[in-house]
Amino acid sequence: MKNILVVDDERDVRNVLGDMLDFLGYHVTAVPDGKKALKLADGGFDLMITDLNMPKMGGKKLLKAIKLRAPHLPVAVVTGYGTKETRDEVTAMGAEGFLEKPFRIAEVKNLVEHTMEASRR
C-alpha cells in the first residue's frame, strides 16, 4: 500500500482528500502545515500532496525545502488559485503534479497516478 502525505491548512480539505485517497486504496497521513510536513518528509512516503496557501510555511516554500531534503519524494500541488503561471512556477520548482480545487475523485486518482509515474522518469 502506498503512503501519501497530505498537507492542507483547511481541515475539510484534508478530510475530503484523505477520504478519497483512502477509498482509492492509499494510506494517508494528513497535517495542517508545511512545518509539520517537513518534519515527516523522511517518513517513507511515496507522494506528498500539498496546498499552496498555508500559514507557518506555504506550499512553495515547502516544495523547495522538500526537493532539497528528500528529492526522491514526488510532490503534487492542489490549490484553489490555479493559474497557468502558478502551474508553470511550481512545475519549474520540481512539482510533478498539479490540480485545482475543487476536485473530483477521478481527478485525484489521475493526479496520484500521473505524479507517481512522472517521478519515475
Image (cartoon, helix red, strand yellow):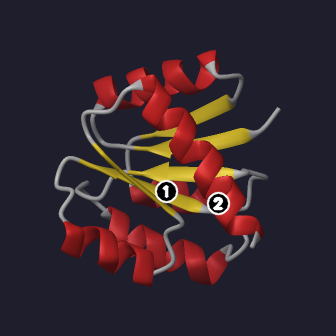
Q: Quadrant of the N terminus?
A: top right
Task: Kindly identify which residue carries mark 1.
Answer: 76
Assign a secondary structure to mark 1. Answer: strand
Query: Which three-letter amino acid code belongs to the residue tagged 1?
Result: Ala
Q: Quadrant of the C terminus?
A: bottom right
Q: Cβ–Cβ below 8 Å for labels 1 and 2?
A: no
Front residue of 116/70: it is 116
Q: Of discs 1 and 2, which sits in the foreground?
A: 1
- Residue 41 circle label: 2
Q: Quadrant of residue 35?
A: bottom left
As drawn, 97 above or below 93: above
Please tell me which residue is depicted at 21% across the width and 57% down the height of the picture: 82
Q: Is residue 47 left or right of residue 15?
A: right
Q: Is residue 82 left or right of residue 34?
A: left
Please tell me which residue is depicted at 56% across the width and 34% down the height of the picture: 109
Q: Residues within 10 Å of mark 1 (few under 14, many from 20)?
A: many
Q: Residues within 10 Å of mark 2 (few under 14, many from 20)?
A: some
